[in-house]
Image (cartoon, helix red, strand yellow):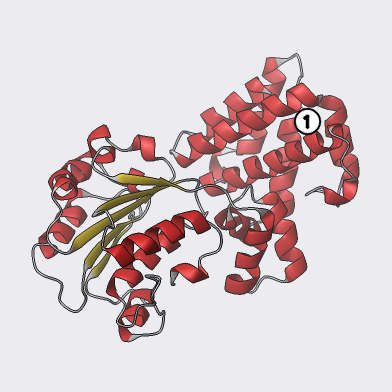
């Protein structure tokens, strides 16, 4: 997808287009930011812009030539995509194979581009194998790493890349992504966008999971907020995680935490005098009102910060049970 079709992140995509046009694009990039906000799409747009056979004057790809088409279908021989395997990691053998291919000149494109998705999943040996190539990239080669947890990368890897930081998207942009690219009905897209905490990827997770179940878990977790009995709060956390044989997956628990964040945002909005019609959970106003009585404004702000830290920890593969118990103890 060309840069012009990427929703949001206009300042960053403009910067990248200009760098491509001027030939000043750094050979090693780290696109960092929350999960699901479009970093991987921008990485693909970089690959297209560098190899497009009919580029626009502003440095963007045409999106239609043979090279762009092959990159979009992931069959371009000079664009290598490295992603995690079933274990969630990227092994050293995968990296070494890519680096061996980088030892030759591009076969069909102007530049060879190595795209590494969720680079925090690179095993330590794989990161070490990358170091020399990141510091002195092979001729006509560009490395683009994406990560929601860049600080999990080795310091030596981070120091060899140019970091661009991506932010969360506003609900209107998320709704655009859902309707345009995923055929979600407009009304449903707007509702999911309000619950997605700035991430189209999170909105899609909500769309494909049982939204009501996620919210029920969130209500249970928040309902224990402020209870004096820590044991009771930890019991609620255990029920949210689920029993061993029927335990929520990491993705399902992330959906619960995002649903809880959306509820807390609604509580804060009520305390600020907002109308019920602007609430993300406006279909259950009585639930939001009950939580507002339990969580005064300072507690709501603390709860939101706690849930944000919990989501970051889950993205970094922290244990689901530990994270949920920590949230319950902090609320």
Query: Is residue 56 something that shows in the picture?
Result: yes
Q: Is residue 233 above or below residue 118?
A: above
Q: Which residue is mark 1?
A: 223
Query: Is residue 236 something that shows in the picture?
Result: no
Q: Is residue 283 above or below residue 273?
A: below
User: At which x and y percent is residue 187?
Assistant: 77, 66
Task: Assign a secondary structure to mark 1.
Answer: helix
Crowd class of label 1 (few under 14; some 14 to 19; many from 20; radius 10 Å)? some
Q: Nearer the viewer, residue 64 or 313?
A: 64
Q: Is residue 73 above or below residue 301?
A: below
User: At which x and y percent is residue 56?
Assistant: 39, 77
Q: Nearer the viewer, residue 254 or 305?
A: 305
- Dividing the picture into quadrants, the one containing residue 177 is bottom right
Q: Nearer the viewer, residue 278 or 28?
A: 28
Q: What residue appears at the point 38 percent right and 59 percent down from the top-left corner?
A: 16
User: At which x and y percent is residue 238?
Assistant: 63, 31
- Dividing the picture into quadrants, the one containing residue 209 is bottom right
């Amino acid at each position: 997808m060309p840069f012009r079709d990427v929703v949001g992140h206009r300042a960053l995509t403009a910067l990248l287009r200009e760098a491509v046009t001027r030939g000043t694009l750094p050979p090693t990039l780290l696109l960092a930011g929350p999960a699901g906000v479009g970093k991987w799409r921008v990485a693909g747009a970089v690959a297209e812009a560098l190899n497009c056979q009919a580029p626009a004057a502003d440095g963007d790809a045409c999106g239609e030539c043979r090279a762009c088409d092959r990159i979009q279908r992931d069959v371009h021989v000079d664009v290598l995509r490295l992603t995690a395997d079933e274990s969630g990691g990227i092994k050293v053998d995968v990296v070494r194979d890519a680096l061996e291919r980088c030892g030759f000149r591009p076969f069909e494109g102007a530049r060879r581009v190595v795209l590494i998705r969720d680079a925090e999943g690179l095993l330590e040996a794989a990161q070490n194998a990358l170091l020399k190539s990141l510091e002195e990239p092979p001729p006509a080669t560009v490395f683009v790493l994406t990560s929601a947890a860049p600080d999990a990368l080795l310091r030596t890897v981070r120091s060899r890349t140019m970091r661009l930081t991506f932010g969360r998207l506003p609900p209107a942009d998320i709704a655009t992504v859902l309707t345009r690219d995923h055929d979600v009905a407009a009304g449903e897209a707007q509702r999911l966008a309000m619950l997605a905490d700035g991430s189209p990827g999170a909105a899609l997770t909500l769309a494909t999971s049982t939204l009501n179940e996620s919210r029920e878990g969130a209500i249970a977790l928040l309902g224990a907020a402020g209870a004096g009995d820590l044991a009771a709060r930890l019991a609620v956390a255990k029920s949210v995680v689920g029993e061993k044989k029927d335990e929520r997956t990491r993705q399902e628990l992330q959906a619960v935490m995002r649903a809880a964040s959306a509820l807390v945002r609604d509580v804060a909005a009520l305390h600020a005098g907002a109308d019920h019609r602007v609430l993300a959970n406006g279909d259950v106003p009585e639930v939001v009102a009950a939580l507002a009585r339990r969580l005064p404004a300072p507690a709501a702000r603390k709860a939101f910060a706690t849930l944000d830290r919990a989501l970051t920890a889950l993205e970094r593969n922290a244990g689901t049970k530990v994270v949920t118990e920590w949230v319950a103890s902090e609320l």
